[in-house]
Amino acid sequence: MTKAVLSTLELLLLLFPVALLLGGYMARVFRGERTFLSSGLRPMEKLVYRLCRVDEAREMSGRSYALCVVATTLGGCLVLLLIQLLQGILPLNPQGLRGVRWDTALNTAISFGTNTNWQAYAGETTMSPLTQMLGLAVQNFLSAAVGIAVAVAMIRGFARKEAKTVGNFWVDLVRSVIYILLPLALVLAVVLVSQGVVQTLRAPVEARTLESARQVIPMGPVASQEAIKELGTNGGGYYNANSAHPFENPNGLTNLLENFALLLIPTALVFSFGIMVGNRRQGRALLAAMLALFALGLGLSFWAELSGNPLLADAGVLAGANFEGKEVRLGIPASALWAESTTATSTGAVNSAHDSDLPLVGLVQLFNMGIGEVVFGGVGVGLIGMLFYVVLAMFVAGLMIGRTPEFLGKKLGAREMIMAVIGILLPPVILLSGAAIALLLPAGLAGLGNPSAHGLSEILYAYTSAVGNNGSAMAGLSANTPFYNLTLGLVMLIGRFATLLPGLAIGAAVARKRTVPSSIATFPTTGPLFVVVLVGVILLVGALTYFPAFSLGPILEHLFLGAGRLA
Amino acid sequence: MTRRSTGAAERRSMFDRALVIQAVRGSFRKLDPRQLLRSPVMLVTEAGAALTTILTVVSIVQARPFSFELQVSLWLWFTVLFANFAEALAEAQGSARAESLRRSRKDLAARRQLADGRTEQVSAATLRKGDAVVVGDGETIPGDGEIVEGTALVDESAITGESAPVVREAGGDRSGVTGGSRVLSGQIKVRITANPGETFLDHMIAMVEGARRQMTPNEIALQILLVGLTVLFVVVVLSVPAMAHYMGVATTVPVLVSLLVCLMPTTIGGLLPAIGIAGMDRLVQRNVIALSGRAVEASGDVDIVVLDKTGTITLGNRMATELLPAPGVSREELIDAALLSSLPDETPEGRSIVVLCKNELGIRGGDIRAPGDAVFIPFSAMTRMSGVDVGMRRIRKGAIDAMEGLVRLLGGYFPEPVKAQVEAVARNGDTPMVVTDGSRVLGVVRLKDVLKQGIKARLAELRHMGIRSVMITGDNPLTAASIAAEAGLDDFIAQAKPDAKLSLIRKYQSDGHLVAMIGDGTNDAPALAQADVAVAMNAGTQAAREAANMIDLDSNPTKLLDIVEVGKEILITRGALTTFSVANDMAKYFAIVPAIFAAAYPELGVLNVMRLSTPASAILAAVVFNALIIPALIPLALRGVRFRARSASAVLRWNLLVYGMGGLLLPFLGIKLLDMFLVALRLV
Amino acid sequence: MKEIRTAFLVILVFSLLLGVVYPLLLTGIGQLVFPWRANGSLVSVGGRVVGSELLGQSFSSARYFHGRPSPSDYDAMASGASNLGPSNRALLLVVQERVDRIRSKNGLPSGTPIPADLVLSSASGLDPEISIESALLQVDRVATARGLDVAVVRSLVERMVVGPFLAAFGDRRVNVLRLNLALDGLT
């Protein structure tokens, strides 16, 4: 209990001050102002523009910006796909791994290009160091930068008045990488190496254990990838066990740092939002809503885990503690905290086995992802998703005070409504359809790792994770089959664009509007009432969407455990 | 705010028999899917009802138990019918009121004037735009138009219900007349301004009647949300059989259709058209004809209103309010002289001086007459004074420079203290009128611009709603400032040129404000066309009426308050019912999900928080509740949620509590009661 | 179109910067400044690599402290969890089995609850540590198997305990490999 509270407090006390500073820094970066790193990084930035023939001063309309987003995302997928297929003939392949199987490669390419990092494969036996470095890690940076750029464009929409442009995608992309992701990743990676995260290009090492068994110890350039995996809310680990693997997450310090890192940029972006729209209190109000939902999910998770599994207690396990799929150096509270963080953002990295979590913990994870990952959320897309809910909430709230809806002085009309509705409601539509299909087809059922209600949760989790671009899994589901690779790949693609493109559209539409001054008749969106309305809308929409699915999955399993019934 | 009924028609209660019957017929007519296309939620409900009906028939034919399916089908049909009824009732009410207005001018006779000056007797229905008609004492004006010649005292009670007659005259800002009103005295020539069927009334009726009605921007946005939710719930419901099958539970189509219809926002989907129509109808109740639904919505957002001074904020004519005798002159002397010189004076100023003097002397009524030998000297632009010669006395009154000149001419002197008094009055923004007897200066009468009664309270109410009021006048700054301060206006523009109104409105709009304007004159037309909410007085010129998007039949400038209220009410009602409708879904889930699954998985019985008797009764209770809530909320939809002028946060908190929490909790109670009822009646 | 060309140029440039320069730079720093950590924290005995400090390995002899159950039996090239759900019959059966085995092997009366980490597998399958309670309940068996004084073995265990990081992350635990190496060092 104390560990639960302490770990949360320590994480938040580290997170918020740094996020605040980073938020201010990022606002300056995207406004083109000088920062303390400018003298060192500006030459590199200019070099990249020259090499890529980018005109820094050009501004883009929403449509052009969207085209760039799609081109970069699909281009990234394509490059990654090629690297994987040609892996067998490319250098830096000490284990001599063959080209990745076509459906796995396609799924992985889409996955990393869309910031999902769903891994249908096991890293140790599928990807060579070159593929990991040049393919996967590069997409980690790029997809994160794409998300940040689109969020910034959307913020500009609210900040600008009667503007036809929302910025330059290439400039935003390059700045995200050079000023934000790369410096942070370097610093974090060095710290990680110092603690034991592996960073080498040598081949795996053969060891002879104390009992004279043969153990082959894997190697690889892990720290460099680990850093961007967390910072960019990617989540794709070097090894199969992800951040449960001691070589990716060796001790409590690295765990704290990695957990902090995956929350950092999403939180900082909300601060940046407040600064860039000239209303810091608005940013804080959004953060309050996110923190409230975070605490809710975390509280429920802690309560469930600390109550333990009555079936295990019956079998003779001390306190019925649910230690299945947990690491000793991390412990149950830190695992629950991480799981909440990773599903609230769209990271998807895991330091415990979610498939073995108690049902209510699984419910929280499913809900976090199912509402679109807006509780801090993924880099960029979290803020975008939250703004969709803000549009919806302000629409209804505006009506209830007798005014046509508005937010930050911008009137919200039919166009904004369509985009917000697509952003919020299309993902659940896709995921429920996909899960339903998988539940009906033998190809889908064949992958199940657990029976009955928990199996339903497994399949639901897979599609929820894919559409939200999360990437974590209840890994009992054997998803490295053409059926799952193709369906989940499609779902990931739709989910990504269903967030980025409507967000961009709202930004562009809102940029063109002029602002309406506030008065006693407008509803202040920086106060507790706004936060309550926003949280209420999110909870209600989520509950209404997933009530049936959750009743048959996690809730039923929870009731099984309570009744002592085995599945 | 008094709500008068229009015309001579009696007040109709909301559920007048004839209207209800008309609405019931309309609700069956609207079952046509082509009609329901405008309301996707109800269209899907109708499809569900048709589907379950077919399945019921199949069950009957196959001799299987069909009671449950039959009841579900029936209640689904009722759901659609109730929604249709709401819309039809609102339409019937709206049309009825407008019809009563229109009826008052049917079968009228008109004297049409031909090109050569002769007049011919024709039926009013044959009048066309541009025709000239003459109307005399006691005759009824045959159609909407503008007076081009003459002045008349008009009784508009058939239109507005107001029995006090009004003056209408050619050339000024009071030249508009409405068909159906009666000339009490006077002779006027009227130019008809609209063809039959194209009058403002006809325009408004078109807006009310469903088939030709266009959805306003806010309605469209709300429909998008409702469609989105519908699509979501269709997918949610379609995923249930897949999950159920995996878990080994069978599901039937009627149950799934029930779940879908219960989840969809049928309450707001069904009542949405009625809310808008009823809003327009409530405007007609307050004697405002809305010509644009968009403008009605925008009026909820108005934050600046631009007002004229003369005739809008002030009475239009100055009133005498104070008598200031010169030193050495008794008060009675001044009163006597002022009274004598004003008794024969027909001007409003003169009459008000008479009233003031009478009040001072404590005399009422018309007992005082001018002495028989008094000769009245009327005001002339040359002398700039008026007065009376009675006996040897020459009493005059006028502006200071004119009086000073007169006194000096007659050899008298103008006392300094009186000059000081004059200055003091002018500095206060009032008009000083100096009264003299021969060469003696008797004193000063203060003439004030008097505010219309209640204007201060009205403007305060507007401010409470967050609306700033701005007065625009050609007067000098001093006078304007004092009026503005007295009336409680937020701002004023003085010495304004005619086009100042238009540029002012443009400037406010570019700053992001939504501007309302009230006007009546031809020079107001450009500004009215620019304003977001433009209210023209019905008595105003045709140009003003055509430029506006709302017509105030009462020609009352504070009508804007009513318009803003109705605009806000419409929006609030939409928001409240949407929240209520969606919040209802939680209870329905708690009724239906355990009903489907608790048989196979008794552990899920925990979800049956309402302790409903059987799966069939639970589902049916939910369906019945979903259907009955629509007619239960029809009065609210038609009346509108009352708008109270409090801060936005307070309004939101209250509405959230009532419709949000209420929407969450009420159905738990409702479904439980219905469940008990259904079981008691052995219907399941 | 121009934007598509720019997209490919950007991907190319960043692939070089982020896919080659960045990881190589980091590898260089790692190998120079933290060579032992960067190369897997390998533990050697007599010039031979016996394992990594950070990775668990299989122990089944009575003379050694046993680690946690592992779905892959500590195959370091196959990290992963069992992914068995909390209501899964298979999980409960295997747990019951392990509980019985541990009770019998360590001389514990039937009905004694066993610390969770010793009967449930880890998320990575390579967890190198066990909780202090799990270590202590093995002390008797190990001491007997090696002919050592129980108090000596116990104090060895207690000396090697590390606590939770910042009082919140992790349990009180011992590294099994280090512990067993120290054991070997005793005799």
Image (cartoon, rainbow, N blue to C red):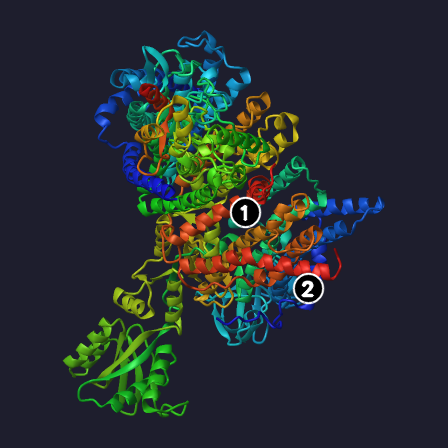
In front of the other: A202 or B304: A202
Q: Hey, what amino acid is under mark 2?
A: Val
- Within 10 Å of the Cα at label 2, are there few (<14), some (14-19), or many (20+) other Cα atoms? some
Report, in whole angstroms, how far the alpha carbon at label 1 lies from the one at label 2.
28 Å
**In terms of secondary structure, where does tag 2 sit?**
helix
User: Which residue is found at the position 18% from the left and 80% from the top?
Assistant: B418
Q: Which residue in the structure is indicated by mark 1?
A: B220
Instruction: Pick whichever, C6 or B100, lies toward us.
Output: C6
Above-or-below relation of B404 to B278: below
Position of B571 compared to C187: left or right? right
Q: Which mark is residue B20?
A: 2
> Residue C28: which quarter of the image?
top left
Residue B407 locus on image (x, y percent): 19, 81
Q: Earlier in the sequence, mark 1 or mark 2?
A: 2
Q: Are marks 1 and 2 on the same chain?
A: yes
Chain under callout 1: B
Question: In the visual, does B546 lie left or right of A529?
Answer: right
Chain letter behind tag 2: B
Find residue B399 and report its horizontal and vertical position in percent: 25, 75
Q: Kindly state the secondary structure of the residue where label 1 is placed.
A: helix
From what the image shows, is residue B531 above or below residue B165?
A: above
User: A299 or B414: nearer the eye?
Assistant: A299
- Above or below C46: residue A370: below
Q: Are marks 1 and 2 in contact (CB under 8 Å)?
A: no
Query: Residue A427 got which mark?
Result: none
User: In this orientation, does residue B276 appear?
Assistant: yes
In this rendering, position of residue B61 left or right of residue A120:
right
